[in-house]
Image: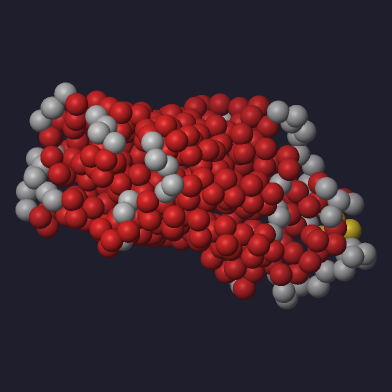
Amino acid sequence: MEKINSTEVIAGSKFNRFHLILLLWSFFIISFDGYDLVVYGTVVPTLIEKWNLSPVEAGAIGTYGLFGMMFGAILFGTLADRIGRKNVITITLLLFSLFTFLCGFAQTPTVFSTFRFLAGLGLGGIMPNVIALLTDYAPKKMRSMIVSIVLCGYSVGGILAPLLGIFVMPKFGWEAVFWFAGLPLLLLPFIQKQVPETASYLIRTGRKEKLIATLSKVSPESTFNLDDEIIEVKTQEIKVPIIGLFKENRTLSTVMFWVAFFSCLLMVYGLNTWLPKLMIEAGYGLNSSLGFLIALQGGAIIGTLIIGRLCDQFGSKKMLVPMYASGAIALTLLGFGGSSFFIYLLVAIAGAATIGSQNIVQAYVSQYYPPYVRSTALGMASGIGRIGGMAGPLLGGFLLSVSLPIHLNFIAFAIPGLIAAIALAIVPAKNAYMDDIDSNVESIKTQVDAV
């Protein structure tokens, strides 16, 4: 009879078909999360005209979905550490796909806002759990890169929304871009079948046969039998997972992560909601302004992939602090105009440094905390961040309503970037869980030998 430790098996595994399937489904899910992020900004100029909304009213409608995301991130992030990440991913995917789809049938701002809130509950919960599940199963040497690749789906979805806005809205109306969001409902049975449950949850619930089957896919070159003994590394029991975020000298880190998430999501949601409108105010047409959204998301993809790779080599913190700062600089320069090429370049840099940095910081947080509070850590940080996300559309609506010079609008969105850079610079890297993974594995081996 052999002794099996799932943490060691997963950490030492090589990327294979199991990881690829998990990566592809995660990419698909996050793409629709990103699609929903940008879809309201795509249609907001049309809705302002159709429903005779003021900029402040339109900004307020934009916050309803974010309000739901805040509750969803905290609720489902914490719940997943108790009932399993796969179960929560299924619930949240159903919520956000169904109610975003129904937004296309809304006839009034009130009904539309209600559906956006309900969809937000699912959207807030899906991201933390997908990222936590990826981190749970990613090979040690590829954690940041795998998460970064999947989070590029966020920007792919963000590009798809304005593209559909350009080509579909003129023929089928604004409603059609919301109907497209129902596609994941059709594929939910396949996702349910192929996405695994986390190993720690399978151990905790005594599902040994399922665990053995999953580990056999994670590490096909290894041999596992039902008679083998599963070694579970004992962790401190915490009835309220949130408390675990403040243990082991992580209080300062937790607060600074919250500040960084708040600041960055204020920029991300503010820009994705109001960038088309700001560019229209600057003299660009609607289609050109939607093109800036595409440049924003394209920059995010490139930034996420490049920085994600560098994070695996040099560390996430060393890459993220200058990224946040460069975003603030790009947004400030954007307000002063220039040639079309220069403007598109600045928008792309802003995308890399805001959305791209937000993608990477989620990978960082997922590795910073131990597995038993990983979903809670991401959920709470995302929930706090959504408060900043709600402030972004409101801030943009207010700034437009008082008719400030265009460069001041961009400076207002640049300031949070500096705040995020400072907050992340304060995070003590020495307290990160994954930074001490080698000693953790050695401790695991010691426990196994002792048994």
Q: Residue at x 86, y 51 (%)?
A: 206
Q: Where is residue 186 in the image (x, y as percent from the top left)?
A: 57, 62
Q: Residue at x 10, y 55 (%)?
A: 340
Q: Position of residue 336 (x, y in %)?
A: 9, 40
Q: How many marks?
A: 0
The residue at the far left in this view is 339
Residue 384 in sight here: yes
Q: Residue at x 54, y 49 (%)?
A: 98
Q: In which quarter of the image is residue 210?
A: bottom right
434 or 147, which is in the foreground? 147
- Left or right relative to 436: residue 419: left
Q: Residue at x 49, y 27 (%)?
A: 255
Q: In the rendered view, tell whether residue 61 sits above or below residue 148.
A: above
153 or 14, which is in the foreground? 153
134 or 167, which is in the foreground? 167
Q: Position of residue 289 (x, y in %)?
A: 19, 50
Residue 364 in sight here: no
Q: In which quarter of the image is residue 153?
A: bottom left
The residue at the far top in this view is 402
The residue at the far bottom in this view is 221
- Left or right relative to 370: residue 224: right
Which quarter of the rendering shows the N terminus?
Answer: bottom right
Q: In the rendered view, tell whether residue 368 sits above or below residue 139.
A: above
- Left or right relative to 241: residue 229: right
Q: Where is residue 254 in the image (x, y as percent from the top left)?
A: 53, 31
Query: In the rendered view, how is the structure colored?
Result: secondary structure
